[in-house]
């Protein structure tokens, strides 16, 4: 049995009059990789953004229901959204390194949160770049602009930057969709390597990737939660015919 780390209860999200997520209730297991799958426009990214309240940045959004993180509803009045987001590292579809050096990209978050000891920062930067599988490639060029890195290296740098603030969770929105196959494999390998230390939730359009990485699967269709469960069960013995149809490529 999986121990829940995030509990979503009756979550509804509206963009204006459009009902994007419809009464979603599901638990996300601790220190496992959870894949959110489903066809385009089904609400995958909206669900991911709801987990750290990035939906707040969308004009006209209305949210009801609960997202419990460590037992606290992140949508309660008075919640410190900055603290919520600090717990959740985010990796977007396209790498988005900051216009600064490789070192400063990695150290950016810790510095904002008050870490100023240079020796401590040096060790943290090395640990995070190692955790992202990038250290050996960049250790002699830490002061170079991050923009000089390849696209795949930039995405691993973004992973290192996310790890540097010591989050409890990693939210990944199709983190390999813009990468070549070798770079994508690097990212997948690192996610599998670090999953014992983090609760990882990722959105993917690629069922083969979900099969490779996921311990748990959430299947959305037209804003509704159709099925969820251990990956092996969902992929080999889905209980809902729509899940089976999607997995078999009938639609999507």
Image (tube, rainbow, N blue to C red):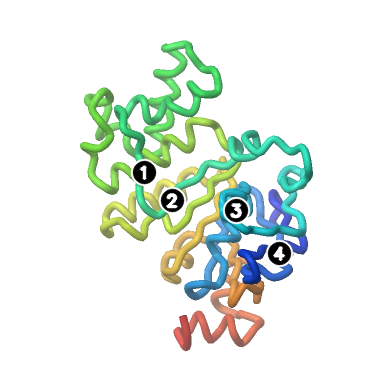
Q: Can residue 44 be seen by looking at this rendering? A: yes
Q: Position of residue 11 (x, y in %)?
A: 72, 62
How much space separates mark 2 and mark 4, taking CA atoms?
23 Å
Q: Within the image, what quadrant is residue 231 found in? A: bottom right
The residue positioned 52% from the left and 41% from the top of the image is 89
Q: Residues within 10 Å of mark 4 (few under 14, many from 20)?
A: many
Q: Are marks 4 and 3 in contact (CB under 8 Å)?
A: no
Asked if the residue under mark 1 is in contact with the one under mark 3, i.e. CB atoms within 8 Å, the reply is no
Q: Are marks 2 and 1 in contact (CB under 8 Å)?
A: yes
Q: CA distance from mark 2 to mark 1?
A: 8 Å
Q: Secondary structure at mark 4?
A: strand
The answer to whether residue 245 is above or below residue 203 is below
Task: Tell me if 104 is positioned left or right of 24 in this view.
Answer: left
Secondary structure, mark 1, is: loop
Q: Tell me the quarter of the picture where residue 240 sits.
A: bottom right
| x and y percentages locating residue 69 in the rendered image | 71, 45
Question: Which quadrant is the N terminus positioned in?
Answer: bottom right
- Kindly identify which numbered label has been placed on residue 92: 2
Measured in 3D between alpha carbons, the distance from the residue under mark 3 to the one under mark 2, in whole angstroms, is: 15 Å
Q: Is residue 122 left or right of residue 38?
A: left
Element at badge 3?
Answer: helix
Query: Which numbered mark, 3 or 2, is in the foreground of this view?
Result: 3
| Residue for badge 1 | 96
Residue at screen point 72% across, 52% down: 67
Q: Residues within 10 Å of mark 1 (few under 14, many from 20)?
A: some
The residue pinned by badge 3 equals: 55
* Residue at 76 percent of width and 55 percent of height: 66
Residue under circle 4?
12
Q: Earlier in the sequence, mark 3 or mark 2?
A: 3
Q: Is residue 146 above or below residue 242?
A: above
Q: CA distance from mark 3 to mark 1?
A: 19 Å
């Amino acid at each position: 049995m999986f121990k829940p780390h995030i509990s979503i209860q009756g979550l509804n999200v509206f963009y204006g009059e459009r009902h994007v997520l419809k009464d979603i209730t599901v638990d996300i297991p601790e220190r496992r990789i959870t894949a959110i799958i489903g066809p385009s426009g089904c609400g995958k990214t909206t669900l991911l953004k709801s987990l750290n309240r990035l939906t707040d940045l969308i004009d006209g959004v209305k949210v009801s229901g609960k997202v419990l993180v460590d037992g606290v509803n992140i949508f309660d009045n008075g919640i410190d959204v900055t603290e919520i987001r600090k717990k959740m590292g985010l990796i977007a579809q396209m790498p988005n390194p900051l216009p600064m050096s490789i070192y400063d990209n990695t150290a950016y978050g810790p510095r904002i949160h008050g870490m100023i000891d240079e020796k401590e920062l040096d060790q943290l930067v090395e640990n995070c770049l190692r955790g992202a599988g990038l250290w050996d490639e960049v250790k002699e060029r830490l002061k170079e602009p991050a923009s000089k890195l390849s696209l795949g290296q930039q995405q691993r740098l973004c992973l290192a930057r996310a790890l540097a603030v010591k989050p409890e969770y990693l939210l990944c929105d199709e983190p390999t969709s813009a990468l070549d196959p070798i770079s994508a494999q690097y990212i997948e390998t690192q996610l599998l390597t670090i999953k014992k230390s983090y609760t990882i939730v990722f959105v993917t359009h690629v069922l083969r990737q979900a099969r490779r990485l996921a311990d748990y699967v959430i299947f959305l269709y037209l804003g509704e939660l159709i099925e969820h469960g251990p990956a092996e069960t969902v992929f080999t013995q889905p209980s809902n015919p729509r899940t089976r149809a999607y997995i078999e490529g009938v639609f999507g």
